[in-house]
Amino acid sequence: MKANSVSANEVPITVAYGDGIGPEITNATLKIITAAGARLKIEEIKVGEEVYKKGISSGIEPSAWESLRRTRVFLKAPITTPEGGGYKSLNVTIRKTLGLYANVRQCPSYYPFVSTKHPKMDVVIIRENEEDLYGGIEHRQTGDVVQCLKLISRPGSERLIRYGFEYAKRYGRRKVTCFTKDNIMKMTDGLFHKVFDEVAKEYPDIQSEHWIVDIGAAKLADKPEDFDVIVLPNLYGDILSDVAAQIAGSVGLAGSANIGDNVAMFEAIHGSAPRRAGQNVANPSGLLLAAVQMLVHIGQGEVATRVHNAWLKTIEDGIHTYDIFNPEISKKKVGTREFADAVIERLGMRPTILKPVEYPSRSDPITVRLSSRPREKKELVGVDVFLDWQGQPEELGKSLENIATGKLKLVMITNRGTKVYPDGLPETFCVDHWRCRFQASSNEKELRHEDIIDLLSKLVKSGLPPVKTEGLYTFGGVPGYSLGQGQ
Ligand code: IPM
Ligand code: MG
């Protein structure tokens, strides 16, 4: 830290005011936390709409990265990603570029002051934040078919899941639940589940359980009080954190902490709500509660406690913005600025019916360490070749058998994952995207990449150029690829 830039106890943070309702809720949030005594040195950066409009398709400029890497703490209001092609989501870019792997979203009920069907719920969603379908790696391969790659890694899963258990330990939570769809995605979601089971064993004092995400989500929506901490892959976490926040009271109330080893970003879980912008109606609570998590993170726990308790007292006093206003429970409908003033008036007070919070005045951020594993022996055993082709499976199968006369033999063809050759059923609906699996018979010598190249050039010469290939490998003798449906 440069001695001349920051007075002794001020912590530098980067703030982006965002788009839509962003500036209003940021002003309200900063006003409250400053009044509560937060010691901050704010660096403002511009991200989002304004930057996209300058033609910068990432929505963020180099100087903004410098600020984020310098302060390592980011309070970010919602931003609008222009719709349509060409623009990548800035939220996702920031999370991934800065390695913010854990997205923590607390979803407690504020019953009886905010309407909910679930008075006892107190769920924390800890969402994997960098991988899964959020890689944004998409391709159109044929006239009919587009694809999105789902990437799940062992280290990515492990650090998130460890963070989930460490979080449970730190905050005295009794149970960690994992949701995946590993009855279908046996390899990707299967890896996440497997790592969960491995890590869970190291925390014998914390209960652990796994649910398939469909029934798990149904249970969460029906009886959220049965859940405590939930860890899950990125997309399920995106969807279920909105569900959890909404059934707890409102998505407008939930803040989120995006935690990495070096940098952390704090934001509301809701979007920029352009239709509500500039009218002094937006609820600043999501961003404010994110700022509370930020204060804990930077070691200003006593300020976090003051802000959070004053906010709880405001909610308890029935001072509500339009989104949670209910004539049967609320006392006064207020705008963004009036809500902020009401919280400021209550600084130093604690709620009397809702449970007050108490953060440790200083606490080290949760850190996790990855386990090390030996690399397994990786052997090439075949290739899946994807073709853009129109016709009947039998016809394609016969020509491929004639072409594949070298070491690699045609084993099967699938269409959208379902086996159509050999022995397909005429009922299976086919599009123009064929996955053709070639493998060396087991009595052949070791398969080499050159054998695959030979096959590919024969295919090209026969007028069947591949649109993509996937190597088939075994790892320590275990196949690293799934079977075709019906294989
Ligand atoms: C969220 C949002 C983001 C996400 C969008 C804005 C990219 O929905 O933070 O949950 O999908 O993660
Ligand atoms: Mg979302």
Image: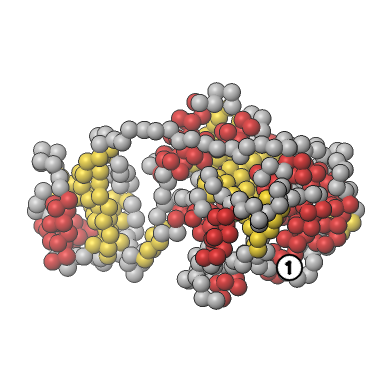
Query: Image quarter for residue 189?
Result: top left
- Please state the horizontal and vertical placement of residue 454, each as a whole percent of the image: 12, 57
- Depth order, front residue of 411/458: 458
Q: Is residue 478 visible?
A: no
Residue positioned most to the top: 204
Q: Which residue is mark 1?
A: 276
- Please state the horizontal and vertical placement of residue 68, each as a whole percent of the image: 57, 57
Q: How many marks?
A: 1
Q: Residue at x 26, y 34 (%)?
A: 476
Query: Image quarter for residue 126?
Result: top right
- Is 365 drawn above or below residue 26 in the view shown? above
Q: Is residue 199 visible?
A: yes
77 with respect to 280 (left or right): left
Query: Image quarter for residue 218?
Result: top right
- Depth order, front residue of 67/208: 67
Q: Residue at x 72, y 43 (%)?
A: 300
Q: Residues within 10 Å of mark 1 (few under 14, many from 20)?
A: few
Considering the numbered disc 1 on the image, is that residue within a helix, a strand or a loop? helix
**Colour setup of the view:** secondary structure
Residue positioned most to the front: 4
- Depth order, front residue of 69/132: 69
- Is 235 drawn above or below residue 65 in the view shown? above
Q: Residue at x 64, y 29 (%)?
A: 174
- Please state the horizontal and vertical placement of residue 8, each as a whole percent of the image: 70, 48
The C terminus lies in which quarter of the figure? top left
Q: Residue at x 55, y 55 (%)?
A: 69
Q: Amino acid at mark 1?
A: Arg
